[in-house]
């Protein structure tokens, strides 16, 4: 019986973490374990990218399953990027609602950015990623997003009424319009 429990515990550590079914955030996870050196680089790049390009709602953080980053062991990586802001507190007790159209454009721009990050990591570190937004699932490979991930981005594009280029251009303007959110 004890050996069964040990086998079950070992099997649990060898599976990637579950993705969240959240309509407000794009969740992702590596499809295989990532060497620790690559995990450290990916986590550092995520932090650097968050500083260079502030997220609309929450910055993208990379987490590890199967041990902490820096322990020398391969591990699954996962995270999520909250896409929608909805409303925010400008000062204690005062809230500002975000125009839903503006929120949709910014959500699309951040989803595109997250998928691009995953693609770059897939190319650089030879790791594939699962992505999920609510019930929509897809993959990001070194060659780019698969058809399901492209469909997910297409649905966000339709909601935003913007192409990738338009979303990124509008992002700068909307960042200024809602600059009191920081």
Image (tube, rainbow, N blue to C red):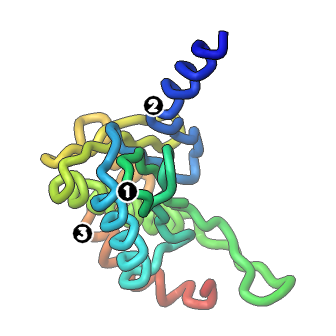
> Is the residue 130 above or below the residue 72 in the image?
above
Label 1 Cα neighbours within 10 Å, binned few <14 / some 14-19 / many ≥20: few
* Name of the residue lying farthest toward the front: 2
Which label lies toward us, 3 or 2?
Answer: 2
Left or right of residue 155, residue 166 in this image: left
Left or right of residue 175, residue 109 in this image: left
Q: Could you tell me if residue 163 is visible in this image?
A: no
Left or right of residue 130, residue 78 in this image: right
Residue assigned mark 2: 15
Q: Are marks 3 and 2 in contact (CB under 8 Å)?
A: no
Please state the horizontal and vertical placement of residue 41, each as a whole percent of the image: 31, 67
**Label tally:** 3
Task: Please identify the quadrant where the C terminus is shown.
Answer: bottom right
Which label lies toward us, 1 or 3?
Answer: 1
> In which quadrant of the rendered view does residue 151 lie?
top left
Q: Earlier in the sequence, mark 1 or mark 2?
A: 2
Q: Earlier in the sequence, mark 3 or mark 2?
A: 2
Looking at this view, is 79 or 58 the one in front? 79
Residue at 30% x, 51% y is 35
Residue 54: mark in rendering: none
Please state the horizontal and vertical placement of residue 86, each as a whole percent of the image: 65, 65
> In which quadrant of the rendered view does residue 145 lie?
top left
Residue assigned mark 1: 72
> Is the residue 91 above or below the residue 115 in the image?
below
Please state the horizontal and vertical placement of residue 100, each as a whole percent of the image: 58, 63
Assign a secondary structure to mark 3. helix
Residue assigned mark 3: 165
Assign a secondary structure to mark 1. loop
Assign a secondary structure to mark 2. loop
């Amino acid at each position: 019986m004890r050996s069964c429990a040990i086998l079950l515990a070992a099997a649990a550590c060898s599976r990637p973490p579950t993705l969240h079914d959240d309509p407000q955030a794009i969740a992702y996870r590596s499809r295989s374990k990532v060497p620790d050196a690559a995990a450290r680089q990916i986590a550092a790049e995520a932090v650097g990218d968050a500083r260079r390009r502030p997220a609309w709602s929450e910055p993208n953080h990379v987490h590890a399953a199967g041990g902490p980053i820096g322990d020398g062991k391969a591990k699954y990586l996962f995270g999520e990027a909250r896409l929608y802001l909805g409303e925010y507190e400008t000062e204690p007790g005062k809230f500002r609602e975000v125009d839903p159209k503006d929120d949709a454009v910014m959500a699309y721009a951040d989803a595109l950015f997250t998928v691009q990050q995953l693609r770059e990591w897939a190319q650089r570190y030879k790791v594939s990623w699962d992505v999920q937004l609510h019930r929509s699932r897809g993959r990001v490979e070194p060659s780019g997003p698969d058809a399901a991930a492209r469909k997910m981005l297409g649905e966000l594009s339709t909601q935003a009424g913007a192409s990738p280029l338009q979303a990124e251009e509008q992002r700068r303007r909307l960042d200024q319009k809602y600059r009191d959110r920081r």
